[in-house]
Structures are given as structure tokens and as C-alpha cells.
Image (cartoon, rainbow, N blue to C red):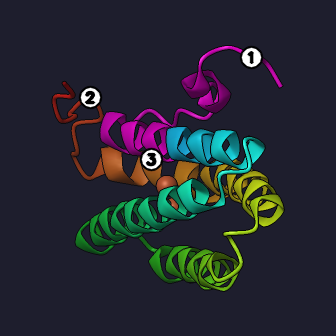
Amino acid sequence: MSSRSTSSEIDGFEIGIAEIDLQHRQLNQLLQRLRNSADKQYGYAANAILGELVIQTRIHFAVEESLMRLLSYPETEAHIAEHRHLMEQLDKFRLRAQDFDVADGLASFIQTWLHEHIDSFDRKFVAHFIGKGIDPSAAPKVD
Ligand SMILES: [Fe+2]
Ligand SMILES: [Fe+2]
């Protein structure tokens, strides 16, 4: 793994919808912070970051799920099932995350899951969303 900036680890995972790519980058940055705090054995900090990660992940999934429903995406249910599966696993891990080894393992697990999910699921809705007329370059202004 390179030692470049944290966001570099999501390079190659852009799907081409700016707002969703921004959310994926933000999740990746939280994962990197979780890893860094785990390295330093800050169990309490890791737990706080994990709490934030859980919230941001829920928000991200809710955004994708709303878009899929509103745009009548045919594979909505299978995609939502994948999101639910991860949230269940996260909730289980979370109970043990004050142990920094668990937090580090958890960050790797979620990062791998995120990349695989983006490649096998998120990429698939792009053509459908654009076909329905969304603006792929629309994104919130970030300070
Ligand atoms: Fe997704
Ligand atoms: Fe996503």
C-alpha cells in the first residue's frame, strides 16, 4: 500500500457520478483514520471514528437506495440486501472495536468490502442513472 495521501487509496474506484464518488472518498478517509488510530492503539479514538463511520455509511447507503428507488433501478433490492448485510456485520464488529487489533482488522475488512461493492454493485447503476437524466457532475460544494 502506498504512503501517499489517504484519498489516493480510492483512486481507480471512481464511478463517474461526482456526488457518490465524493461520499466514497469520505468513507475511505474515515477508514484511513480508523486504521491510523488503531496503529497507535488508541482504542477509544478508534471507537469514536467507527461510530462516525457507521453514521456516514448509513447516510451514503440511504442516498444510493433513494436514488435507485426514485429512478426505478431494476436491481434495487439485490443492492439494498448487500448494504444491509454490511451494516449487520458492522454492528457486530462494533461491539468489539475498542480492541485496537479488531479496529485495524475491521478497517481492512470494510475497505475491501467497499472497493468490491463499488466495483460489483455501484458501477452497475451508473448507466441507468445517467439514462434517467441525472447530472453526473453535480456535487455539493466542499469547503
Ligand atoms: Fe452501494
Ligand atoms: Fe456506494
Mark positioned earlier in the residue sequence (3 or 2): 3
**In percent of the image, x 74 and y 62: which residue is there?**
106
Which amino acid does the dot numbered 2 rest on? Answer: Ser
Is residue 30 found left or right of 103 in the rendered image?
left
Q: Secondary structure at mark 2?
A: loop
Figure quadrant of residue 71: bottom left
Q: Which residues are magenta?
A: 1-27
Residue at 67% of width from left, 69% of height from top?
Answer: 98
Tell me the mark number nearer the camera, choosing from 3 and 2. Answer: 2
Q: CA distance from mark 3 to mark 2?
A: 12 Å
Question: Is 114 above or below relative to 64?
Answer: above
Query: Mark 1 or mark 3, which is nearer the start of the sequence?
Result: 1
Q: CA distance from mark 3 to mark 1?
A: 30 Å
Specify the amino acid type for callout 3: Val
Residue designated by label 2 = 137
How crowded is the residue under tag 3: few (<14 C-alpha within 10 Å), some, or many (20+)?
Answer: some
In the rendered view, tell whether residue 107 sits above or below residue 83: above
Quarter holding the C terminus is top left
**Image coords of residue 46 (percent x, y):** 60, 56
The dot on residue 3 is 1
Q: Which of the 4 image quadrants contains residue 36?
A: top right
Determine which residue is flagged by label 3. Answer: 126
The kind of secondary structure element at disc 1 is loop
Residue 20 on the magenta span: yes
In this rendering, would 4 be left or right of 24?
A: right
Neighbor class of circle 1 (other Cα within 10 Å; few <14, some 14-19, many 20+) is: few
Q: Position of residue 85 (x, y in %)?
A: 63, 82
